Image (spheres, rainbow, N blue to C red):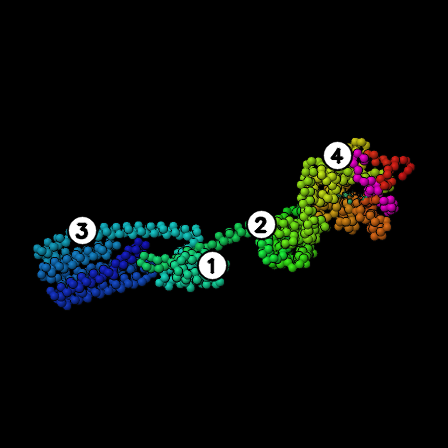
Amino acid sequence: MTPIQLRQTTQLYSRLLYSAVGTLFTALVIAWVLADRTQRMQAWGWFALMVLVSAYRWAIAFAFHRLPEARRNDIRWFRRFRWAAWVVAVVWVLPMWLLYPSEPAYQVMMVTALVGIVGGSIAILSYDRTTLTVFLIILMLGVIGRLLVQGDALSLQLAALLLVFFLLMIKGGRDIGHSFIELLELRQSAEEHNLTLLSITEEVARIGYWQWDLKSPVLEFSSNLRNMCGISGERLGVDECLHQVHPDDRERVRMAIDNARLTGKEVSVEYRQRNPRGKDWMLMNQVIKRVEERGGKQFLLGMVQDVSVLRKAEQKIFDMAYYDELTGLANRGHFRERLREKVKHARRRDERFALLYIDMDGFKQINDTLGHEKGDDFLRQFSRRLKKAVREADFIARLGGDEFCVLLGDIKSSIDCVQSAQRCLALRDEPVILDSHNIYPQLSIGIAVYPQDGEDDDSLLKAADAAMYAAKQGGKHSYAFYDNEMTEAAARRVRLEADLQRALREQEFYLLYQPKVDLRSGQLQGVEALIRWKHPERGEVSPDVFIDTAERIGLIHEIGEWVLDHACSQLAEWKRQGLRLQMAVNIASNHFSAARFVDRVGETLDRYQIGDGELEVEITESLTRDPQQHLKVCRELRSRGVRVAIDDFGTGYSSLSVLKQLQVDTLKVDRSFIRHLPSDPTSTLMVRAIIDMALGLGFDVVAEGVEDAAQADFLRELGCPYVQGYYFSRPVTAEEIPGMAGQLFVGDETLVMAAPGKR
Ligand code: C2E
Ligand code: MG
Ligand code: MG
């Protein structure tokens, strides 16, 4: 059955119940009249037949109304109605033929009664034109046929009148039927259109709705809601619906429904619902409202929205705003917020808490030598470990780069802070493994305590940062508490950073040269270029003060290149004057392993025509440097005729056992070993071993920091070929060097003219 036919059938059946009352009343009057005028038994028999037929029609109408829409949608109901209507038409005309009264007045009365039935049928049957037309034709043929058979003048005149009347009725009935159908079609298409719009809207907005006629035991669902929740039927009982809801949320949803039903207020509830397409739960938001129709009928209406995607997006935005993407720890903004809260809280309750400011030592080198991807990997692994190292109640954040902060709540004494810091430092015991590299995370930790080190978030952070810096200065991989002096140190550091930038721009650096003496001949063998900074306010600043800072802020590459260029330019100048010297230049370790360092050195050599063996690069050993990369740079430099020296030998991690593998030319024995010569037996032993081993392996050896004659004599005895130190000369300006060449160094900075035969 088409939707229109279903509507027609519904309309036809809905009129039937009250039309039956008219039918039976009219039939009763006719039967009564006929029983008096004609055969009594037949008349009442006919009435009984009419009651029977009407009862059948009632029965099917009743059955039809009780059925759900899907089952009404069966063409047989339509046919049953039709045939029953036509049978009724036949029953109506039966008395005309079987019980027709002889008195004209009663004849007219009967015809009039049937004309009334015709009128009624137009009102009842016009929703189906065929049913109506056939109904009218049966009546017309029955009535007019009988009048024609009667054949008297009155009957013939009546027949003529009725013919016109019937034809008009048929025509009028068909027109009305036509309009009705048009109306139904119009309504149908409007509804279909609305439904389509509604269902598209539902689908796009991921919403659905249900309605509950409060008198009915079941709820009705929109198609999209059925789809969303995987419900197959159109209706479900309340309990069945709640069964789909997460057990923990079920009671809440039930209460929301009851609340809306009893108070008539709009109620909103969010809950988890089983996902029909997976094992997980969907997050749903439901707004429930009681609605009252004009007839007083009450409904509950529920609008359900799947907010899983929305909530996920909200969560993602929240995470982005509050968490660090790389490590998943809280980010700086989140941390500041938490710190401010903590301060407020502690102030109200008169509590103490501490802040650990953690900075990794040497992270920049990991990034420079292994690449940023490995650096990220390292940070991720380290963060996971750090999380495990702190207590659950502590709040941990990554402030950026290699800096982390931990908020320690509930501090009883400084011992608590120390224990936490030590747990973090203990992370070094186990290496972070990146490919084949084992990296032992080294940390500098600053500790600031509320309220003594700062009463608000800003000052606490500054204090912890200053303490961290002090820890770093005091020899890395350690912790330090904050005190006032540290704040000043931090301020000095900030000033130093700014000053360094300016120094490079304004050419405030210059070089001094410290002679390197050949101990066997007493002659000047070469010089080491040492940087000096003439600070406009502070005067001379030692490299020990600023080289570390320059490394940290990344300015060391530019400074290193400046030194290299000036030293080589000076060497070229001395060569023009006929001096043959070796020039040693200090290079910071991360500058040494930077990309293009070798190329830059090569360009400088070409620019100043520096020959093989004339330039020596001094580097110190460091823990995290990639040994392969280190060897490669050394090899490349040496292939270009640049010598490589290990500075401060004995303080780094190169041991005598790895000397063989080093791609270097010279070892510079650190000052700390020379200082106690020759009285201290340990120093004596070590220096002797270093010199013997180094010479045996074919290295040059330079002893640094020779300050007196005893040291010089002892070194000479050990066979140390070269020395540097205040005993021979302090670092001097470039202008002083030519005067020293060709002279004999005998110590204590006194120079004697080199004379033939005299040593
Ligand atoms: P270094 O390379 O070991 O340089 C030797 C340092 O020892 C120099 O200090 C020098 O003045 C000092 N010295 C020399 N003889 C004696 C002595 O007999 N007794 C004592 N007590 N000290 C002596 P300076 O010039 O202050 O340099 C300190 C450090 O700064 C250097 O140690 C080097 O590591 C670094 N540095 C200096 N110039 C540069 C540079 O141009 N670039 C880089 N990257 N670092 C540099
Ligand atoms: Mg040096
Ligand atoms: Mg040195």
The magenta-colored residue range is: 708-737
Q: Earlier in the sequence, mark 3 or mark 1?
A: 3
Crowding at dot 2, Cα within 10 Å, few <14 / some 14-19 / many 20+, comes out as: some
- From this viewpoint, is residue 277 visible? no
Which one is earlier in the sequence, the residue at label 1 or at label 4?
A: 1
Spot occupied by residue 490 in the image (x, y as percentages of width and height): 68, 46
Q: Are marks 3 and 4 in contact (CB under 8 Å)?
A: no
Q: Is residue 732 magenta?
A: yes
Residue located beneath label 4 in the image? 569
**Which mark is on residue 168?**
3
Residue at mark 2 to residue at mark 3: CA–CA distance: 88 Å
Residue under the point 36% across and 62% down: 214
The residue identified by callout 1 is: 271
Disc 1 residue type (three-letter): Tyr
Which residue is labeled 2 in the image? 333
- Foreground label between 3 and 1: 1
Q: CA distance from mark 2 to mark 4?
A: 50 Å
